[in-house]
Amino acid sequence: MGKNLTSRTEDYSKWYNELVVKADLAENSAVRGCMVIKPYGYAIWEKMQAELDRMFKETGHENAYFPLFVPKSLFEAEEKNAEGFAKECAVVTHYRLQNDPDNEGKLRVDPEAKLEEELVVRPTSEAIIWNTYKGWIQSYRDLPILINQWANVVRWEMRTRLFLRTAEFLWQEGHTAHATKDEALAETVQMNDVYAEFAQNFMAIPVIKGVKTESERFAGAIETYCIEALMQDGKALQAGTSHFLGQNFAKAFDVKFTNNEGKLDHVWASSWGVSTRLVGALIMTHSDDKGLVLPPNLAPSQVVIVPIFKTDEQLEAVSEKAENIIKELKALGVSCKFDKRTTHRPGAKFAQHELQGVPLRIAIGPKDLENNTVELARRDTLTKEIVKIEGLASTIKDLLGTIQEELFTRALNFRDEHTTEVDDFETFKKVLETKTGFISAHWDGTAETEQKIKELTKATIRCIPLVDYKEEGKCVYSGNASKQRVLFAKAY
RNA sequence: CGGGGUGUAGCGUAGCCCGGUUAUCGCGCCACGUUUGGGACGUGGAGGCCGCAGGUUCGAAUCCUGCCACCCCGACCA
């Protein structure tokens, strides 16, 4: 603590890296590409988990757990999926170490302990899950299966960044099985909607719902739905995905069921997930040059009370007030931390809680005791005011709601200001270089054009939005006919 | 995985080209005192296998080789 952050304009990516570490969210570990999520960062993830878990259960899903390891033969069963992940799989080949005869005190892999079949560390769990579902499904009466799992996965990324892309990360993956195509598709759309609602209402991150182009689609899916968010540096970030898998995995794993007409058919499937990457999205959406800005819904502590005092008597008197406030806040469901450390002075505490994004700060000192007031400071606007202690708890409760809304509105305005309709390629390039953000433009629907634009500008099609933009037009690159605008951006 | 950069106390750094006393400075840390409404001050103190492993040399933070990690750029990336 005690050092200023690099500012966002100076070096956005440095700002992000410093913030994650200084706000005590996470740090790099001794394992390449893998992070240690520290208690404060994990507390935020737990808040996300709790809300998502509630939403999943509300929509009829149950949690279960499947193994970390996937036998290679199962993994390769669905070819497109296997191919898509092949380059980033960690593989277990041995099951034992032994003392190294040539190197005292060291261990080596026991060459005798080679596995007959290699185990792939899951980059995602479709394979092991569909292999399991095969044994669970005979009839339409066994359907649907609506399961979610909270798990870690490993993708051997070449270039990693804390939360945004790590070799191991935490996520949830839902895997559902259905009797009909319509039902599976409806599930896919529903879960994408759940993600959108979660992002917007809970995380205060505005998102655009859409589908991926073929080249950006999940390997093994028929259609990939997604929510796309825009970060403060004008780059897009995929915040969640939901895949309609058709019968691809059912066919690969031979999962058939008898329908109510007595006919055998393959099961229809969906899968969907969000990960600890959301923590990165959270940081890059709301935070500023002073540190984290957390929406009240996600803050480990929504309020912090800092006592101002000179003598023990004053601390005692202030503490008594503070405890009362905490009690009242607790009754209203507001979480509050009392920072009565005597080892730090108030200014240092202010700075720390700002860095860590606590939404509201209350300072109580001798003057307040006389006047029956407190100083109330907002993290998001950096404003403070003196307020009467009567009715403080409900004032705070309301204010937290206001902050939550205003954070969303601010982010929404930013996104709208950074979404530009463009109709010619010169402007396209110029907007991408200067203004950044989403570019809404016509696209002829071909992978060739998509690829060409990517090569020339580094922008990719983030999604084909589900609503809006339905209009005839001409492709911004090729000039060929187009039926709707799609969203381009440089992406994380 | 290719190109470039960095690695010296918890953090940030000087020293490295051109090898040679006890490795520099700031922050932080510990003790005591004075302080406490926006990152306190004074005095004293502790803390280092100079990223790791080899090599060259009478002698290596410094030169050479290999490895590891992180950062930037590229390629790759449900």
Image: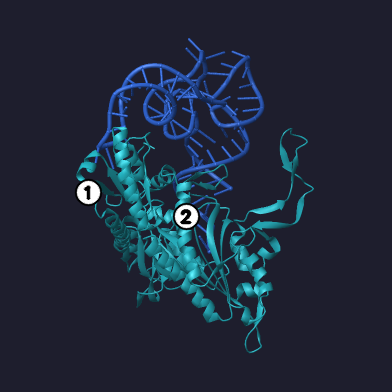
Chain colours: A cyan, B blue
Name the quadrant containing residue A437.
Answer: bottom left
At 34% from the left and 47% from the top, the residue drawn is A323
Q: Residues within 10 Å of mark 2 (few under 14, many from 20)?
A: many
Q: Is residue A488 above or below residue A140?
A: above
Residue furthest out toward the right = A112
Total numbered badges shown on the rendered structure: 2
The x, y position of residue B25, in whole percent, is: 39, 23
Amino acid of disc 1: Glu
At a point 63% along the width and 85% down the height, the residue shown is A259
Residue B22: where, in percent of width, then height? 50, 15
Look at the picture and state if A79 lies above or below A100: below
- Whether residue A443 can be seen here: yes
Work out whether residue A61 or residue A208 is closer to the camera in this orientation and state it: A61
Residue type indicated by callout 2: Trp
Q: Looking at this view, is A370 or A335 the one in front?
A: A370
Disc 2: which residue: A45
Q: Residue furthest bottom?
A: A261
Query: Which chain does the numbered disc 1 sit on?
Result: A
Q: Quadrant of the N terminus of chain A?
A: top left
User: CA separation, marks 1 and 2?
Assistant: 31 Å
Q: Give the residue at mark 1.
A: A385
Q: Earlier in the sequence, mark 1 or mark 2?
A: 2
Nearer the camera: disc 1 or disc 2 = 1
Q: Quadrant of residue A438?
A: bottom left
Percent x, y of residue A93: 71, 52
Cβ atoms at labels 1 and 2 below 8 Å apart: no
Residue at image location 77% in from the left, 46% down from the top: A111
Q: Nearer the viewer, residue A489 or A320?
A: A320
The quarter of the displayed image where residue A198 is located: bottom left
